[in-house]
Amino acid sequence: MTLETIGQFATEFDDAVFLIGLAILLIEIAKGLFGGSLKGRGLLDMVASASTQIPYLLVEIFLMSFVYIAMVMIAENFVSWQLPLTWWTVALALLACDFTYYWEHRMAHEIRLLWTQHAVHHSSRKMNILIAIRFGPFESFASALFHIPLIFLGFPPELVFAGIIIVLGYQTWIHTELIGKLGPLEAVLNTPANHRVHHGCDDKYIDKNYGGILIVWDRLFGTYQREEETPRYGLKRDYDSVNPLSVWFSEWPSLFADLKTSKSFSDSFMYIFGRPGWQPKQKASRKVLLEQGQKG
């Protein structure tokens, strides 16, 4: 076993789940055509999902190679220890990448700057396999940064990147309504049912089920919610655009608008790094009073 064979396995795994995803997509298209649901906005939404790969791949080409080089340089110049390459360390690296993904994913929901990227993935009112490739342009870059601490733990950069590919690749097949609940597997793995919850914007489904491969992280850290009724998919706010450019940059206009009205550095900081929806106390109070007046 070498790092090269592990990298090759990760690539082949990614190719295999791509083919599985393609098979699911063909079934979804056939079902939509025969059922009459694949037309108009439904079709345009799928096109919008696929279109997000354009800016995403451009960032992948121009930035991710530099991130990988940075990881290699850190490992060679600042980390004098490295875990031995065994099946146990490979399994541990995959577990570590999955654990890191949980927190990376959770932070993408809790830090507005990261949410500007991840919201793209959540901006569709549909649930189909193309949502699996509906990404913000800089999501892969942010993901790699979260995994840098694994280099300091002694994991080789090649092993970390292989883990990232496998964790992301696994999630391809879970973006569908074709597959129901999978019995005991629901307690351990991130399944289509568990992930449908994550894409729900109903109050009880918001910010739940962050796991990549394993759903046990959500059970451990109190963010698990089982699927009950079918979720209403998409963003909490009223957003249903199928315009690719709007989908790519859906969260930026509101962020810039808030920064424009900012009265202090601390307000600007919180607009960028606080939770999505954060508002200064005075502005939040005025909003509550306005909503109460409208109800009255």
Image: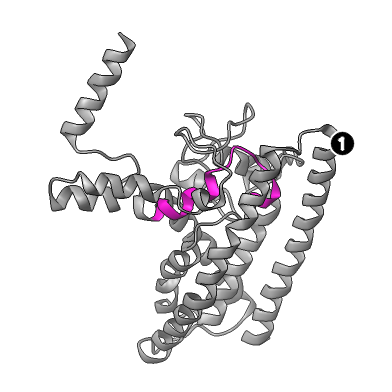
| 155 or 53: nearer the viewer | 53
Query: Quick check: is 103 in the magenta stretch?
Result: no
Question: Residue flagged by tag 1: what amino acid is it?
Answer: Phe
Is residue 189 among what the camera can see?
no
- Quadrant of the rendered structure where residue 35 is? top right
Mark 1 crowd level (few <14, some 14–19, many ≥20, 10 Å Cα): few
| 184 or 193: nearer the viewer | 193
Residue at x-position 54% and y-position 76%: 61
Residue highlighted by disc 1: 34
Q: Is residue 284 left or right of residue 19?
A: left
**Residue 193 horizontal/vertical position (percent):** 66, 40
In magenta, the rendered stretch is: 114-131
**Residue 75 horizontal/vertical position (percent):** 42, 86
Residue at x-position 45% and y-position 48%: 250
Query: Quick check: is 115 in the magenta stretch?
Result: yes
Q: Is residue 296 left or right of residue 9?
A: left
Magenta stretch, main secondary structure class: helix
In which quadrant is the N terminus drawn? Answer: bottom right
| 119 or 95: nearer the viewer | 119
